[in-house]
Amino acid sequence: MPLPDSVETVTLRLYDALHADGTPRRGSIIITPAPAAIITSGDNAVFAGPVSATYDGTTVPGPLVLVATDSASITPIDWTYTVQERWYDAPSRSYPIALPAAEPDVDLAAIAPVVASDGTLVPAAGPPGPQGEQGPAGATGATGPPGATGATGPQGTAGATGAQGPQGNPGATGATGAQGPKGDTGNTGTTGATGSTGAAGTNGTAVLNGSGSPSSGTGANGDFYIDTSGSGFIVVWGPKASGSWPGSGIKMAATPKITVASSAPSSPATGDVWIDTT
């Protein structure tokens, strides 16, 4: 049957017992609590007697789950176990050990022997007694340190408006405001007086024409000249620069018919070109 949940336990792992030549020993290990009886405080269970593990020369016995020697739920407390190693083919020995609950899993080979003890009995708690009478009030204690500042309370009701104070000094000039919207168009003003005549402008260029090449006296700088004396072609001269015409004109086909005159065209044929020099 398993131990009660209130009892603290320790898992004790046994070692592999061998002879000097490596062959396994045969025998048993017997572990006995020093107290004659161990009693739990809440479950009314009583533990007594040894626990043994047998070495059959083939396998190591499995671990043993034992009551911790300082479990707070038992009495006595802080007792020890006695370990007896009984071998058929080797000397036996006996020694006391403690299994504190702080080490819930331990190897037997790593435990150092301790002084044997039957433990200390822990009196069991009896039923609660009746409540006693209330004693007199004690003297007032010294004032404690100030407590931490409490949280800010809710805002109170607004008070009445106070009297108006004296006028303060003028404040600094504020920044320039944004530009306002465009105003309506104003009424048309009266016509002003006629201004004086301006200076004569620079002469513009002209396209001249004639029969034959232009003479040096014909036209002004920037002008062009068209020689219409050819049959089926014209010769264009210009522009005149520094008082002189270019050394030769540009011959251009005059088909369809190209007419140069200082008037609007009269009855031209389809495709004709008429140059009005007015």
Image (cartoon, helix red, strand yellow):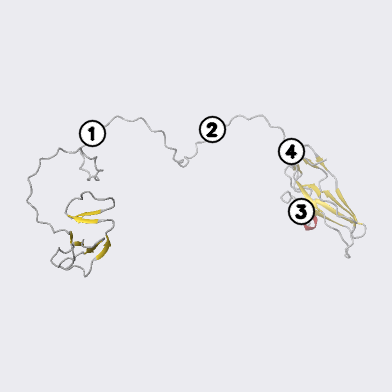
Of tags 3 and 1, the one toward the viewer is 1
Q: Earlier in the sequence, mark 2 or mark 4?
A: 4
**Disc 4 residue crowd, few under 14, some 14–19, many 20+, Cα 10 Å:** few
Percent position (x, y) of residue 278?
Answer: 16, 54
Q: Secondary structure at mark 1?
A: loop
Residue at which label 2 appears: 137
The residue at 84%/49% (across/down) is 32
- Find the distance from the CA under tag 2 to the CA under tag 3: 55 Å
Disc 1 from disc 2: Cα separation: 59 Å
Q: Earlier in the sequence, mark 1 or mark 4?
A: 4
Q: Which residue is mark 1?
A: 164
- Reply above or below: 58 against 1: below
Q: Secondary structure at mark 3?
A: strand
**Quadrant where the N terminus lies?**
top right
Q: Which residue is mark 4?
A: 124
Q: In the structure shown, which secondary structural element does the residue marked by tag 2 occupy? A: loop
